[in-house]
DNA sequence: ATATATATATGTGTTATACCTATAGAGGTG
DNA sequence: CACCTCTATAGGTATAACACATATATATAT
């Protein structure tokens, strides 16, 4: 499925109210992303795009030690989009399950 | 999920031992493809590529009325690839289900 | 000094595919 | 007979997603 990273990021942000990109990258593995899939470039680009689309907001955090972080927060619009994603994903699960049903019928046991 | 049309075509061909593209297009709806998704251009291009990859073979059928048809058949290699797809799809179902589990935990009832 | 971890960002080539268009045979209708 | 529609295959192209590589800068450990 395409753009699956987006709903994962939205859900991670809902779980923790705020987080920066590097932190989100660490947690994407919970959704089955491996090192290649959770490519930093892809994550940061997704976050920037999500901000353009209005599903998240961000601000710089220069308070902590280390390089500046961009802190992301879910918007109400983002929560709506997350719900839409959930519907979409449920639909895909049903679709894939239907395939497997047919497959198992063709290749029993 | 990407290239989902391929396992569907392979499974359809396993079900009917042989079929031409236009016929397969009609049956793709069984797998949740709508008119846009089951775009003829995409179907035929997929079939040609699958032949290049050795998962199907084809020959022209000029016997029947109407324009000539290209009849496709599943190869043993194609059946192997279909089994690989089934594994891949099962994995994706688990992955998406895991997302939904987390989602439902975040938004109960 | 230098290597590593933290943190963000851009450049780019490949791939999948949606949408559009082209071609052509066969049958039906005014 | 002209025209339309259905059957059937195919290619052209623009967009989009993404993997992989690279650039940047700060802080810490050796």
Image (tube, coloured by chain):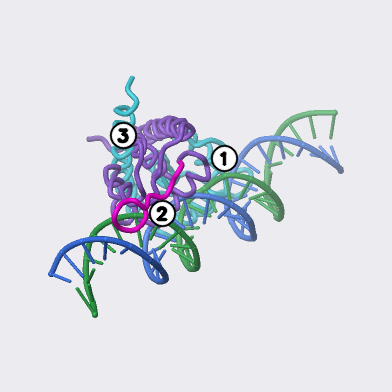
Chain colours: A purple, B cyan, C green, D blue
- Residue B99 percent location from the top left of the image: 32, 36
Q: Chain of mark 2?
A: A
Same-subunit check for callouts 2 and 3: no
**Quadrant of residue C7 within the rendered picture:** bottom left
The vertical placement of B91 against B107, above or below, is below
Task: Say whether residue A59 is visible.
Answer: yes
Location of the C terminus of chain A by quadrant is top left
- For mark 3, give the secondary structure: helix
Please identify, in this view, whether the residue under mark 1 or under mark 2 is nearer the observer.
2
**Residue at (33% x, 19% y) in the render:** B109
- Which residue matches tag 1? B36
Q: Earlier in the sequence, mark 1 or mark 3?
A: 1
The magenta stretch spans residue A61: yes
**Residue B97: mark in rendering:** 3
Report in which chain the residue with disc 3 lies. B
Q: Nearer the viewer, mark 1 or mark 3?
A: 3
Range drawn in magenta: A57-68
| Residue A42's disc number | 2
In the foreground, D29 or B14? D29
């Amino acid at each position: 499925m395409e753009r699956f990273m987006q709903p994962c990021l939205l859900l991670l942000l809902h779980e923790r109210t705020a987080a920066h990109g590097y932190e989100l990258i660490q947690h994407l593995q919970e959704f089955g992303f491996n090192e290649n899939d959770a490519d930093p470039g892809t994550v940061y680009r997704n976050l920037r795009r999500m901000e353009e689309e209005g599903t998240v907001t961000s601000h710089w955090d220069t308070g902590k030690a280390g390089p500046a972080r961009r802190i992301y927060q879910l918007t109400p619009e983002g929560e709506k989009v997350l719900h839409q994603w959930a519907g979409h994903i449920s639909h895909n699960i049903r679709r894939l399950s239907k395939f497997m049903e047919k497959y198992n019928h063709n290749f029993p046991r």
